[in-house]
Image (spheres, grey):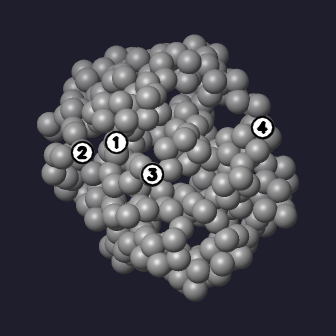
Amino acid sequence: MTRVLILGGGGMLGHKAWQVFRAQDEDVFVTFLHYDERLRATAVFEDSRVIPAVDAWKFDSIRGAIAQARPDWVLNCIGIIKQREEAKDPTQAIYVNALFPHLLSQTCSQIGVRLIHVSTDCVFSGRRGPYRETDPSDAEDLYGRTKYLGEVAGPGCLTIRTSIIGRGLFRDLSLVDWFLTQAGRQVRGYARTLYTGLTTAALSRELWRVVTEHPSLEGLYQVSSVPISKFDLLLMLNEAFHTGTRIVRDDTEVSDRSLVSDRYWQETGGHPPPWPEMIRELAADPTDYARFRGRTVGTR
């Protein structure tokens, strides 16, 4: 059985990757900076497979986690996302998003452990989409630039450039979590903003498929869905979650960060999951996010 170490289990992707991999009976360990009572109370994780006090800023703790887990694969879900204030701090963003993945890549390569690093469509500005792997990054903000610099390649290293939507364990930083807080209200939906992300569950299944079926994949691959507008995406979320939100079409904001992922799907024999299927699964997720946040989804 393949053993996987997930770095950053408390994030939107990290906790979902843990759930998906464990559901497939994978031998998985997961790290946290602070594994506290609030995380234990979620009952999402297994204490015997948690490695606490792992800090990207203290790289010896990363080495220690790898030595303890002895994985075949490391999945890096540590990163500073655009919505957090830290993303505006050059010191933090440059280290965590740009330098840390390369330190991790070197460490994994030295001991023969394969690495999957997750990057973002925000390495592009959205002015000239759709984008291919060969297109140069044209991001102008600190977040996009640091994420681009953090993309790793080379023997045993795979960067998945993608975008995700999903639920966070505690914070309302994601599009979906924000939208659910707007239940019964009025929001704008950008009809000329195109998006090709995946749900965290769908991406986690692709990561599991890479580990188990395509372990020789390395370098940079884009993984994306069929393009959808943010307006249509919100309409789907509204219907699936029964939020009763009024979504007003807005044509003023124009952006196309859509990613072309033909190469990935052709080489792995897969296909992009349909949006209705992903959204239905997202709404039916049995993880009790409402309990973690102390409120009921679908009510104001």
Q: Where's residue 133, x and y in %?
A: 24, 45
Residue under label 3, please give it: 216
Of the numbered discs 2 and 1, the one sitting upstream in the chain is: 2
Residue under label 2, please give it: 133
Amino acid type at mark 2: Glu
- The residue lying at 43 percent from left, 62 percent from top is 156
Of the numbered discs 2 and 4, the one sitting upstream in the chain is: 2
Residue 94 in the image: above or below residue 227:
below
Residue 242 in the image: above or below residue 286:
above
* Labels 2 and 1 touching (C-beta < 8 A): yes
Amino acid type at mark 4: Asp
Residue under label 4, please give it: 288
Considering the numbered disc 1 on the image, is that residue within a helix, a strand or a loop? strand
Amino acid type at mark 1: Gln
* Labels 2 and 4 touching (C-beta < 8 A): no
- Let me know if residue 192 appears in the view: yes
Q: Nearer the viewer, residue 286 or 142?
A: 286
